[in-house]
Image: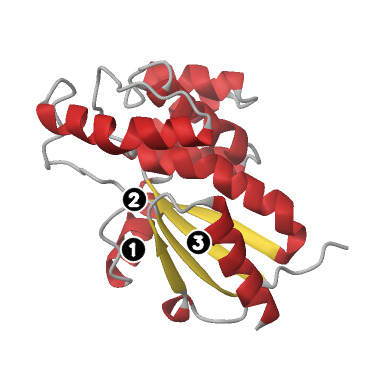
Amino acid sequence: MTASPRVRLDVWSDYVCPFCYLALPQLARLQKEFGDRLAIEWHAFELRPAPTPTLDPAGDYLRRTWDRAVYPLAAEYGMTLRLPPVQPRSRLALEAAEFAREHDRFETFHLAVFQAFFEDGRDIGDLAVLSELARRSGLDAQALEASLSRGDYTDLVLHAEDRAEALGITAVPTLLLRPAAAPIEAAEALDGAVPFAQLAAAVRAQLEA
């Protein structure tokens, strides 16, 4: 019988956010460190939902941000990220992740989408790309395509985004840490790509409270 978690960490994230990808291995390490005492759940958050314009992939803003913050942090964490040549909408990828979650392949697919975008520069707003990533992640690619065409997970993604708005979340990654029995409104907010030591100390403090 699996023990119930004592602490929960809710993570709002977008696949076009490099800092969300940078947070991924830190959170995986955190899960390994605390095991079943900690439950981590990822939630959808579109940084630029339609009709908000997407960023210019060749624009000065992205280049400055990557030079100033993304590349140095990636080097610190030992990760390889490249500024993608495209800036797609992320709604379809977020819906596909919910399909993967329902079919017990969330972690594998989640990582695959981040890697496809930030390491290989692929268009994760393209159904064919998502289908290939699904197949490589052990999912039924045809079932995924049919599900996305029907919009099976659209409401789930929109609900996660509405919940973020209600909680005052305006940027990602946003991490909300709380005792498992506490309401999410009482959670401690940890913003940005938080270093592992800071994450571990925060979880430990919750466990010892």
As helix, strand or loop, the secondary structure at mark 2 comes to loop
At 71% across and 68% down in the image, what residue appears? 5
At 60% across and 66% down in the image, what residue appears? 201
Distance from Cα at disc 1 to Cα at disc 2: 8 Å
Residue 150 visible in the snapshot: no
Q: Which residue is mark 2?
A: 45
Q: Quadrant of residue 83?
A: top left
Q: Which residue is mark 1?
A: 164
Q: Quadrant of the C terminus?
A: bottom right
* Label 1, residues with CA under 10 Å away: few <14, some 14-19, many ≥20: some
Label disc, if present, on residue 89 of the rendered structure: none
User: Of residues 25 and 9, which is closer to you in this image?
Assistant: 25
Q: Is residue 15 above or below residue 197?
A: above
At 47% across and 75% down in the image, what residue appears? 187
Query: Do labels 1 and 2 touch, CB within 8 Å?
Result: yes
**Total marks in image:** 3
Q: Amino acid at mark 2?
A: Phe
User: Of residues 129 and 168, which is closer to you in this image?
Assistant: 168
Q: Quadrant of the N terminus?
A: bottom right
Q: Which residue is mark 3?
A: 10
Residue 185: image x %, image y %?
A: 42, 79
Say which label, 2 or 3, has the lower sequence index.
3
Residue 179: image x %, image y %?
A: 60, 77
Q: Quadrant of residue 136?
A: top right
Q: Amino acid at mark 1?
A: Ala
Side of 3 relative to 200 (left or right): right
Say which label, 1 or 3, has the lower sequence index.
3
Side of 8 relative to 83 (left or right): right
* Label 2, residues with CA under 10 Å away: few <14, some 14-19, many ≥20: many
As helix, strand or loop, the secondary structure at mark 1 comes to helix
